[in-house]
Structure formats: structure tokens, C-alpha cells
Amino acid sequence: MNDQKIRDLETRPIGQLLFTYALPAVITQVVASVYNIVDRVFLGQYVGALAIAGLAITMPIMNIIHALGSLVGVGSSARMSIVLGRKDIRWAEKILGNSMLLTIFFGALFLTGGYVFMDRILQVFGASGETIDYAREYMQIVLPGMFFTTVSFNLTGLMRASGYPTKSMWIMAGGAILNIALDALFISIMGWGIAGAAWATTISMVATSVVAAVHFVLPSTFIRFKRHAWSPKLYIFRNILLIGMSPFLMNFAASFVVALLNMQIIKFGGDLAIGANGIVNTYGAFMVMFILGVCQGMQPIAGYNYGAGHNRRLRDVYLLAMKCTVAVGVFGSLLAMVVPRIILRAFTSDAEMLDIAVPAMRYLNVMMPLIAFTITNSQFFQSIDKPWIAIVTSLSRQVLFLIPLAFIVPSIVVHFGGYGLDGVWMACTASDVLGAILAAILLVSQLKVFRPGYVAPQKTPVKEATPSTLD
């Protein structure tokens, strides 16, 4: 075991520690978002607005795949941090092996369903006669690559949890650089269009997952694949899935919320409005990647110190992470308010699409600081093994508030003579505010975890905490 990496989590100053873990995680998240951003930029500049709209249709499906990656990846990395806080290496190895078994199972399940029901799924998520060919061509190529996306998401998260945040960053950065190079080659030089974007993404993710897997077979890695770790354990599956349920439901719900929003967007704005929403969401997702990066840097520190009973350090890392994420939210909101057209021109030069996207840019990003607050709380509760609070926090904004508001607010706006599409954007803004209020209420209910002397409950079977009984 690399004792120094573990000692750092409970002895090194919180500011230095969060910087050490968060910076690689931020860079990892940002470069991961490059996959979607670069695809949109190249398609917008070399293919056209309808290609962007077709790609936007596929995003809910990609979110579902990402949700499966989160279900296993977030759950396993959070669980590994907690057991490392208890100094149980054998248990951590079993989490590694069992998380891969879950990843393979869910990946195979989704690939099969994706190919069998592809056209029906694309139509549900808003594909029209003009955009479905683009969407289908992209998905037929990229689906196998998405399996490797879940593998890389899981393994790079476990690398961070076991003390290798910088290495995780370089692996993801290498995949993003490869994706950019292949996009340029396949789209702008070889003229493959949306198929080129799909092949670039697929090849990049295969390469990333292979390199990440190699890390866990190297003799120098203290948590690595071992034969005993591949034995399926139902209680490990349960613990991984319970913690990972929050990000899974958040991403899964987001996909269906997007489908409902697309229905309203098409109703009031048509295909170009779908494309406009796609590029606006790309900007929002890019800013959220910074927020998630800080949260991912917080996660192993919070999980370890929660498991070890260091409550003051738990409080300190939470407060520092919250300050950082809200600051990112303020910056992202200001950019969207002040220079939206400049940002959007990177994706498209279509004047009509830009006219639709500019107000959407402002409505959807004005509450970015509150979005940061909600996300940070959800990620924190995941880290300290409070999955149900994390689930409620993460789902409230999208499901509890946005779904009804997306239908109520546009109707009210139209009734008073306004533009229905503006009502859709307003509904998103209102849900951000209401979600943050609920997140604050739930946080207050859990402040006890920061008090000196608070002992984290042992939620797992007693036998699970004993290495000799894990065989």
C-alpha cells in the first residue's frame, strides 16, 4: 500500500489537498467535455445547422449511457475512498473487480437495446424527418464507443480515489487530444461529416479505456486487478449501486427531461430551436464540468475523512469546495449574460439559429451559481454515503420542478401574448432557483456530520469490514 498517499488524505492541509485532487479532476472534466464541443464546432462549421440539430437529438441517449457510467463509476470510487479511510486494501480491490463486472453487464445491456430500438428512441427524443438520418448515422457508429466510455469513467474515477488524480487527468486529456485530431482529419479533411465525428469519438474512447485498464495491472499500482477481486459479491454490488444511484438518476432523468423539453421547443421553435438548445447546453455543460471537477477532487478527501471520523477536515473541504464551485458559477453566468453571441458563434454562423440561441443562453445560465450550489451538495452527500439525500438533491431541479414548469410557464407566457419559447427557457431558470432552495433545506438537516464527535454509522455488514471474511 502507498502509505504516503493515504496519510496525505488525513494530514495534509485541506487547501493543498483539494488543489492537488481538484485540478486534475477539473482538467479531466473539461477535456472530457471537449468530445461533444469539438464535434459540434466541426459539424457547425463544415456540415451545417441541421447536423448540429441531429447531434443534439443524440445527447439524451449519450446522457443515459453516461448515467450508467455514473451509476458504477461514482458509486465505486466513493465507496473505495471510504474503505481506504478504514485502511482495508483487500476490500478496495474487490470494489475494483466488482465494479468492472457491473460495467460490463450494464454496457452490454444498453448496447443491445440501443441497436434494437434506435429509431424509436431517436423519435422519442425529438428527431424529425430532417434530422433523424444525421442522428441515426452518428449513433450506429458511436454506440460501441460509449461502452468504452463507461469503462474509462469507472477506471479513471477509481484511479483518483486510490491516489492517482494526475495520472487520471493525463489519460483523459490524451483521449481528448486524439479526438480533436481525428475530428479534424475525418470531418474537415476527409469529408466524412457526422460519421467522422462518431468515429473520432469512438476511437478516442477505446484508446482511453485501454490505457486506464493498463494502470490497474501494473505491479507499481497498490490497488490493482487480482483474482479474488473478480468474485461477484452481492453486498459490494449493493453498496456501489446505492451510492451511484444519485448521479445515475440525475443523468437518466435529465435525458427524459430533455425529451420533454424538446417536445416544447419543437412546438414553439422548430428544428433550429432544438439545435440552438443543443449548443447552449454545450456551454452550460462545459461550465458544469469545472464544477464537477472540483466536486470530484473533494470526493476522495471527504469520503476518506468521513470514514476515518475526521469531521473538522470534512467540514473544511466541503466549505472550500463550495466557495470554488460557486465562484465558477458566477464566472460562467457573467460570460453568458455579457457576451453570448461571441460564444455561440464558435458553434454556428447561422443567423436564425443565433437569434434563437442568444436569449436561451441568458435564461439557462443566469442561475449558474445556484446550479453550482445544488450540484456540490449532491456530490458531497454521495461522498459521505448518504445516497437518498443526494438523490433528492440531484433530482429536484430536473424532475420535481422542471417537468411541470416546462408545460405550465410557456402556457402562461402565451396566454399573456408572449413568445412560448421564452416560456420554456423561463421554466429552466425557475427550476434552478427552486432546486437550490430545496438543496439548502436538506443541507441544514444534515449539519450534524460536521460536529466534533459525530461518528459515521456503519451501514455495511460487520463481516464486510473484516478482510479475512472477504474471500
Image: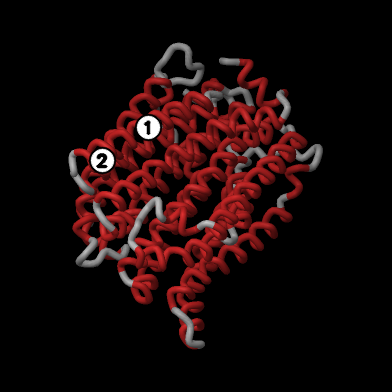
Q: In the structure shown, which secondary structural element does the residue marked by tag 1 occupy?
A: helix
- The x, y position of residue 139, in whole percent, is 25, 49
Which residue is outermost to the right?
A: 452
What separation in Å lies between label 1 and label 2 (alpha carbons)?
A: 20 Å
Q: In the structure shown, which secondary structural element does the residue marked by tag 2 occupy?
A: helix
- Displayed quadrant of residue 84: top right
Please give the name of the residue rendered at 45% of the width and 26% of the height, measured from the top-left corner: 170
Question: What amino acid is at disc 1?
Answer: Ile
- Above-or-below relation of 291 to 208: below
- The x, y position of residue 116, in whole percent, is 20, 53
Classify mark 2: residues with Cα within 10 Å, few (<14), some (14-19) or many (20+): some
- The x, y position of residue 197, in whole percent, is 27, 44
- Displayed quadrant of residue 89: top right
Tag 2 residue? 144
| Viewer-proximal residue among 406 and 426 | 426
Q: Nearer the viewer, mark 1 or mark 2?
A: 1
Please give the name of the residue rendered at 34% of the width and 61% of the height, measured from the top-left corner: 275
Question: What amino acid is at disc 2?
Answer: Pro
Point out which mark residue 177 bears: 1
Q: Earlier in the sequence, mark 1 or mark 2?
A: 2
- Above-or-below relation of 104 to 264: above
From the viewer's perspective, tell me whether residue 221 is left or right of residue 460: left
Visible residue check, residue 235: no
Please give the name of the residue rendered at 37% of the width and 42% of the height, measured from the top-left corner: 35
Please give the name of the residue rendered at 40% of the width and 56% of the height, measured from the top-left corner: 279
- Residues tagged 1 and 2 counted as in contact (Cβ below 8 A): no
Visible residue check, residue 50: yes
- The x, y position of residue 5, in whole percent, is 61, 20
